[in-house]
Amino acid sequence: MHSKTPVYWHTFIHPTFQNRPLYLATTTQGLCRITWPTESLETLQSWVEKRIPHARLIEDPIPLANATSQLQEYFAGTRQSFSIPVDLRGTSFQTAVWNALAAIPYGETRSYSDIASDIGNGQAVRAVGTANGANPVPIIIPCHRVIGKNTTLTGFRGGLQVKETLLQLEGNHHYINQGHARFQF
């Protein structure tokens, strides 16, 4: 019989997302998942079932207090980088992409081809986009800072309006707005 791996979760609600919840989850190794406001608790549950064998979800805000605090500071404009341990669960390629995303400075953007070059695989632009979309801890690992090579906002799991909101929060206006800024949940 396998012992159950505890995965602690809690809800993070902020006016930036019209008070729609983000669900945060952590293992004892670090933050492992943040959902977008368009995703449900079932999204989190399904992800945990697939990625963490023998997991047991436990609602508990205490193990997520540091992450919650740092996210509050980020949305208040007083935090530009995070010091939260993460427990990344993905392929070696995905992890390489996520590490490259984590290196994009606050207020800056990169293209998908920039990230492909950064990981030493300049031809893997589409695969970089797929890995970017699978980022399990958005905001902490800033997948929103990746835009099209022609500086347009491109597909985004959280929705283009969320991407634009996060870029604006960081003071980045060096992209082409294609009229997707209104929240429509």
Image (tube, rainbow, N blue to C red):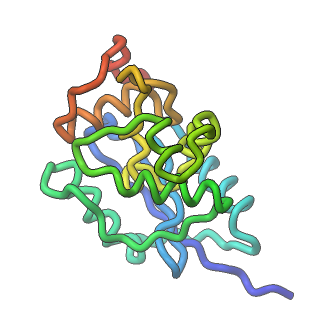
Figure quadrant of the N terminus: bottom right
Q: Nearer the viewer, residue 159 or 97?
A: 97
Residue 171 location (% of width, % of height):
16, 36
Give the residue at the far top of this rendering.
Answer: 179
Residue 50: image quadrant is bottom right
Q: Nearer the viewer, residue 4 or 87?
A: 87
Give me the residue at 55% from left, 52% from top.
120
Residue 25 location (% of width, % of height):
51, 64
Instruction: State whether residue 147 is above or below residue 86.
Output: above
Q: Which of 101 and 8 is in front in this view?
A: 101
Q: In this view, does 116 lie to the left or right of 110?
A: right
Give me the residue at 47% from left, 50% from top.
118
Instruction: State whether residue 137 is above or below residue 55.
Output: above
Figure quadrant of the C terminus: top left
Q: In this view, does 175 lie to the left or right of 125?
A: left
Q: Nearer the viewer, residue 139 or 64?
A: 139
Give me the residue at 54% from left, 75% from top.
27
Instruction: State whether residue 10 is above or below residue 124.
Output: below
Q: In this view, does 16 lie to the left or right of 133?
A: left
Give me the residue at 62% from left, 64% from top.
89
Give the residue at the far left of this rendering.
Answer: 78
